[in-house]
Amino acid sequence: MRTIIADLFSRIFCNFLTLFGESFVNSHLIRGGDGEVIRKIRVPGENPTGLALESKRYLWHCDAYSAEIYKIDINTGEIKNSFKAPGSHPWGLAYDGYFLWNSDDYNCAIYQIDVEKGALVKEFKYPGTDLHGLAYDGNHIIVVDRANCSFIWINPENGTVIKKVPIPLCDPESESGGLEYSGKYLWHSNGTKSIIYLIDPLNGRILRKIKLLPCHPHDLAIHNDSIYVAVRNLKCIYEVKVKWK
C-alpha cells in the first residue's frame, strides 16, 4: 500500500510539472544548492530507464515500454541511431568502451550488445529477480538487484558473481534503480525516495545525497560536471549540475 501511494503521488506531481513548465523544474528539482537542472533532453517513449555515456559525446538510452535503445548526441539531443533491445523490458545500460551492456528486469538477464550492428553478442541469465541499474568499473559489470537490495559485481567474461554489497536504505518494495561508476565511487538513484546517493562500493556506506522532487529518477550517466538523469513519466533526461567535492 505504501508503494502504491508513493507511486500515485509521484505520477500526480509529474503531471503537475508537465502542465506548469520547466521554470519550476529548473529552480526546484534539486534543492539546497547542491546542484541545478540546466537542461532537459526530450526522448521518445513512455518510460525512460537506462543511460550510459559513450566517448563523452553520446548518451545511450533505453525505454522500458518500447524496448528500444537509442544513441543520442549529448550536445544537441538528436537521435543518431536506434535498435530493438534484446529483451522485452530493458532497464540499465553501461558502455565498456567497445560494447553496450543492458540489464532486463523482466527476463532477469544481462546482455552484451554490438553497438555498430545493434546485435546481441552474449547473454547471462542472472540467478535473481528485478535487475535494474547497470555500471562498468573497468573490470566488472555492476548491477542493481532490487529484490535482494544488493549491488552485484559480475565477471563480464562468464557471468560469474564476484561479490555483493548491500544497498543502503533499501527494501524490496522501494525503487532502487539507477547506477553509475565515477572512477572510485558509485552513484545510485532511488525512485521511491527521489534521492541520488554517492556510495562507497567497498561497504555500501552513503557519502553524500542529492534530494530530488518526487519524480522517480531512473538510470544515471556522468559527463564532465553533470549527472544525466532519466526521469520517469516526463519522457526526458535531465542534465543536473553537481558541485563535485
Image: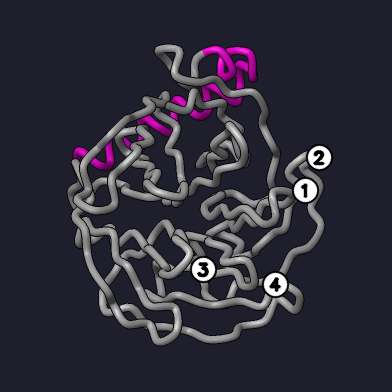
Q: Position of residue 113 (x, y in %)?
A: 61, 76
Whether residues under marks 2 and 3 lie with C-beta atoms below 8 angstroms apart, the answer is no
Real-space Cα separation, disc 3 to disc 4, in angstroms: 11 Å
Spatial distance from mark 4 to mark 1, Cα to Cα? Answer: 15 Å
What residue is shown with label 4? Answer: 115
Task: Name which residue lies at 22% across and 48% down.
Answer: 204
Identified by mark 1, the residue type is Asp
Please name whichever residue, 229 or 243, is drawn nearer the observer in this view of the structure.
243
**Above/below status of 239 relative to 140:** above
Pointers 2 and 1 in contact (C-beta within 8 Å): yes
Query: Which region is colored magenta?
Result: 1-27
Real-space Cα separation, disc 4 to disc 2, in angstroms: 20 Å
Q: Is the stretch drawn in magenta largely helix, strand or loop? A: helix
Residue 81: % across, % down: 79, 62
Q: Earlier in the sequence, mark 4 or mark 1?
A: 1
Front in this rendered view, residue 34 or 200? 200
